[in-house]
Amino acid sequence: MSNIHPTAIISPGAELDSTVSVGPYTLIGPHVRIGAGTRVASHCVIEGHTTIGQNNRIFQFNSLGAVPQDKKYKDEPCELVIGDRNTIREFCTFNIGSPGDRALTSVGNDNWIMAYVHLAHDCQVGNHTIFANNTQLAGHVVVEDWVILGGFTVVHQFCRIGAHSFTAMNSLLFADLPPFVMAQGQPAQARSMNFEGLRRRGFSAERIGAVKAMHKALYRDGLSLHDAMARIGGLAETKPEVQPDVDMMLDFLKAASPQRGIVR
């Protein structure tokens, strides 16, 4: 294949679409599958039971599909699955899952992942996210759609990060971050809602108004979480178009870990 550099080492068991390109000195293991149009640059190692979709761009010096950094791991055939149209910049490390959870680490579609990002075992990353340089996720972290994580954000294991949320540079997340919330600090605290991001994504004035009301209930009026959820639940009574946003927030809060709680 003319688009595979002669110094690349591709295992005979690997399954690469004929349109995949692979740069110099890259190693691809026997259980790897890569879809059409994906470009893998030089000096990458892709191993384990790893599946990569279509039209991804994987820059040089990445390690994808290595075993988890988990002492309990005993060579079980766990997986890493990456979707379509993702950009993965230099020096990222994505580990496969572990048998103690889903046995799967997953990345969705259309994500922009900058240099030195670490995804530990069993992380779940949605679609349209942005991870700035040196974002570090411990094991079992869930990141929903449209999340933006600022540079050097560090996320504790088992935390969940809600859709459309945002962290500032150097944030430490030890609790679940609800949808729409902008957080900053060590540990991170809620500062506002991601209003500019919502406007850019075409949220109507009514939907943004509902998000403002959610922020007020959760963070400004001194309500308990139970009372804040009750107030949020009533927001759609006069504005039914905000019901999906209300449901997303309530579903997230109901599932919040009693040990960690939410970022407040």
Image (cartoon, helix red, strand yellow):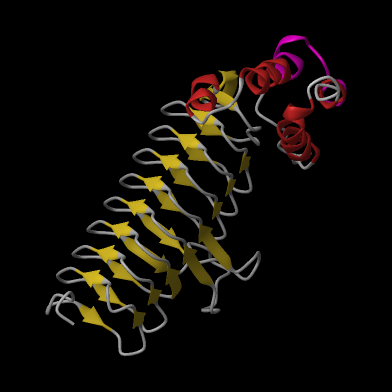
Give left or right: position of 143 versus 256.
Answer: left
Which quadrant: the C terminus?
top right
Which quadrant: the N terminus?
bottom left
Q: Residue 106 location in percent, x, y?
A: 53, 60
Residue 225 lies in the magenta-colored region: yes
45 or 231, nearer to the observer: 231
**At 66% across and 23% down in the image, what residue appears?**
207
- Vertical placement of 264 versus 132: above or below? above
- Vertical placement of 168 versus 72: above or below? above
Q: Quadrant of residue 26?
A: bottom left
Which residue in the rendered view is the most extreme toward the top?
Answer: 221
**At 22% across and 70% down in the image, what residue appears?**
22
Q: Residue 248 location in percent, x, y?
A: 72, 37
Give left or right: position of 140 versus 255.
Answer: left
Name the magenta segment's main secondary structure.
helix
Residue 78 lies in the magenta-colored region: no
- The residue segment tinted magenta is 216-227
